[in-house]
Image: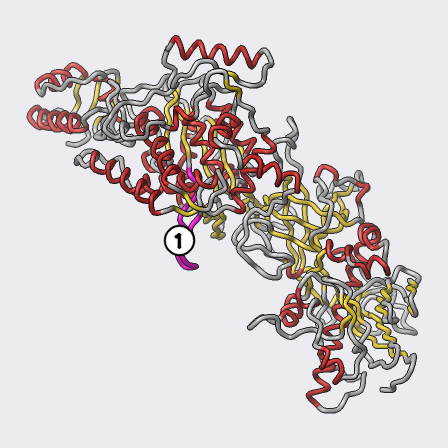
Amino acid sequence: MSRGESSRDTWRGGGNSGRGGATAGGEGATAGEEGATTITGEDGATTTATGEDEATTTATGEDEATTGEEGVMVGGGQEILSLPPSLDKVQERRLVPLKQFGPTLWWTTDVPTKVGPCISPKDEIERQGSILVDYAELISDQMVIQELPDLAKELKEQPEMILKCLGVAIHQVLTTDLERQAAELQGDELPVTTPLISIPHISARLYNYEPLTPLRLLRASVFGRLVCVRGTVVRVSNIRPLCTRLAFRCLGCSQTHALTLQHSNYTTPTKCAFPNCRSRTFVPCRSSPLTQTVDWQIIKVQEVIGGEQREAGRIPRTVECHLTSDLCDSCVPGDTVTVTGIVRVTKDGLHRGNKDQCMFLLYLEATSVSNTKGLQSKLGGQGSAEAHSTEEFSLKELYAIQEIQSQPDLLKLIVHSLCPVIYGHLLVKAALVLALFGGRQKNINKNSVPVRGDPHVLMVGDPGLGKSQMLQAVCNVAPRGIYVCGNSTSSTGLTVTLSRDSATGDYALEAGALVLADQGICCIDEFDKLGNQQQALLEAMEQQSVSLAKAGIVSSLPARTSVVAAANPIGGHYNRGRTVSENLKMGSALLSRFDVVFLLLDIPNESHDRRVSEHVMANRAGKGRMSSSVVSRDNSQLESSVLLEHSDLPLSERLQVSAGETVDSIPSCLLRKYISYARQYVQPSLSSEAAETLQHFYLSLRAQGQSADATPITTRQLESLIRLTEARARLELRETANKSDADDVVEIMKHSLADTYSDGLGNLDFERSQLGSGMSQRSVAKRLVHALHMHAQKTNQKEFDLQTIRSVADKLNIKVMDFEGLLSSLNEQGFLLKKGAKVYQLQTV
């Protein structure tokens, strides 16, 4: 190689860029006929993209120049391009001194082989065939602004050309570096024509592109432009091979040549490229070495609808995104992804014949996929890390969050801000607020089963008490909330659906409500109307995943969500003589998965009814803010040995609005941001005092429920206490849960237990299981069944009328408030079978 002043050496290597020639020199840049792009540095180094598979790089040094070693301008968002070689190596190689462009772009000639102890980004780029490019750092670099002031505009309008040029640049750097290393190992430089290495096609994956485009604005005006959308993945297809270059054999001269297929459109050559051959008939050669294929996958992205973005009467918008190469398998149904890509059009897939040949469908040709939720986060298929919901916060929002956190009684403020149109039910609202914040999910090690950190809440009560409105309020303020109604929901609509694509015939998974609400809240109204669909919630509520085994497909999708449900009792009114399970016709396995269960009963009370009516009239009058002049506990707790143990100022009294006090509610949009910030950045843990308080309360409950017939208290109640205590600390953005947090959670749990374990006379009875019989003494049912069994053996008759059963009960001196309810309970448990009107058959004989 010759050296000298103003010497020019040109290297031609592999790459992928647009068609057309380009020349460059000095400080300027000139494009070719068909849009080839040239990037020129201060010292005259130039990168020029020409042809389909060629790239020309011209390097000009001030004093000395070495072919392929200086003057390459590359872009990327990794550390690989931000670590220049040491100056001593530069002096040893007698190269031009390096000049730093910025954090993203470097005037560099070397690629570090290792960053850290065991990571080789160069090998990773070669293996993945892609490199990450941070859009924010790219357009903010001063040298880029000086050389290419319209880069942002050109990238938006001509994204394909710019991205290909970036890929060509990094391909040039890798090729030059590997050639130099090979030459150093052999001792002598080999001729330029000798192929030392073979690097695959490199794609530039642009991420952090701004601004975000709503899916409703994907119209014909953005065709061919670069956009960035965010949404939830609702459908993922199988990975299929896509041919990008296909070899054809001419039937006239039997010569083989390749043709590049643009945008997945199959085309054939119009004429033979060899001279003296006029044949126009070709046969595709799919097994030829000239044929190239890449992985190809289609995902369907649905827009994320927030509280202020909901549009009544419109279904959520969706768009198909085509993923290729390393982008495949970067997401699963239910993930929230940010897709940057080029808007393309394709023919309508309905095949309507010649009638609608002008009809097209928009889709997105993805250039990068950022998975912003889930345990694995992938950008362009490179790298993975534990990630939570990566929502961005502006400086104004951070100041507002800090102002909210500094309030003296934050729990009271948030409780009254949750659903201000509903009066009372403060402890129920407090439990809903804790469900919104959630506890911390614990992963002891990589191989262990994670411990659930999302609490579940169930509200049961008479109609007209505001259960549905509180559910709507929870869904509106949740950063990620899904609202469904039980009477119009199927089991597959709750979990996952296996559908078949009519075009390709492949099976694909479509996410249901629980999967879409991953790392959020799923509000289910009319929970008692689910029927058999309730069994679909068992796995999702405890293991926080949804499994599917159908049509030869076995899959498991994450469903890390808090279930907040509301149900009405059978018959329209809650019967205190029965348990929650009997009032709802709900299985014990499902009911035990709820952390807290609240009863909302419509009990006539003059003072309470007066306050409710005043509150309703104030809302109708448009006052907006609730001002209370009466202080009273609207949810009186039952007196028992457990309920009396508490501080002088219980939570229910601290949540009350004092006389003349006005509560300034937090707006829903700001409360949503506060909850999102707390869930993203605060991971609380229990202090020793809080753990001791929870353990003491749990042991006291176990001591009162040691009867052989009573099994209401299990370790699930202890885990519920821990989750709610962590949520109470997260509400105030604290990393440690103290004793006061545990005391508040204990009072909420006492209120729930007082509702679910009290009998029809208002006494707290721990021998009354919320999952089993509704009688105060379950041994009464056993005595009655045993007496009927002995009577059936004596009379050799298994069927009894109501009068006979009453006479047997009178002989045993069994006195219950609702005798027919007792028989109905035995019928549900399988001891008695109702054969007709007041006729029962004993099933134990």
Residue at the (92%, 63%) spot, across then down: 30
Number of labels in the image equals 1
Residue 228 appears in the figure: yes
713 displayed left or right of 348: left
Alpha-carbon neighbours of circle 1 within 10 Å: few (<14), some, or many (≥20)? Answer: few
Give above or below for 201 relative to 357.
below
Give above or below for 832 relative to 183.
above
Q: Secondary structure at mark 1?
A: loop
Q: Where are the magenta residues, as a range?
A: 441-455
Residue 835 appears in the figure: no
Judging depth in this view, the residue of 283 and 376 nearest the camera is: 376
69 displayed left or right of 789: right
Tell me where residue 141 appears, x and y as whole percent. 78, 58
Tell me where residue 715 appears, x and y as whole percent. 30, 43
Queried whether the magenta region covers residue 185, the answer comes back as no
Judging depth in this view, the residue of 664 and 125 nearest the camera is: 664
Judging depth in this view, the residue of 660 and 119 nearest the camera is: 660
Q: Which picture quadrant has residue 698?
A: top left
Tell me where residue 192 appears, x and y as whole percent. 81, 83
Residue position marked by numbered label 1 in the rendering: 449
Question: In the rendered view of the protein, which quadrant contains the C terminus?
Answer: top left
- Residue found at the very far bottom of the displayed protein: 187
Q: Amino acid at mark 1?
A: Val
Residue at the (27%, 27%) spot, across then down: 644
293 displayed left or right of 62: left
From the image, give the main secondary structure of the stretch colored magenta: loop
Give the colour scheme of this rendering. Answer: secondary structure
Give above or below for 212 relative to 7.
above
Judging depth in this view, the residue of 669 and 409 nearest the camera is: 409
Queried whether the magenta region covers residue 442, the answer comes back as yes
Tell me where residue 139 appears, x and y as whole percent. 78, 55
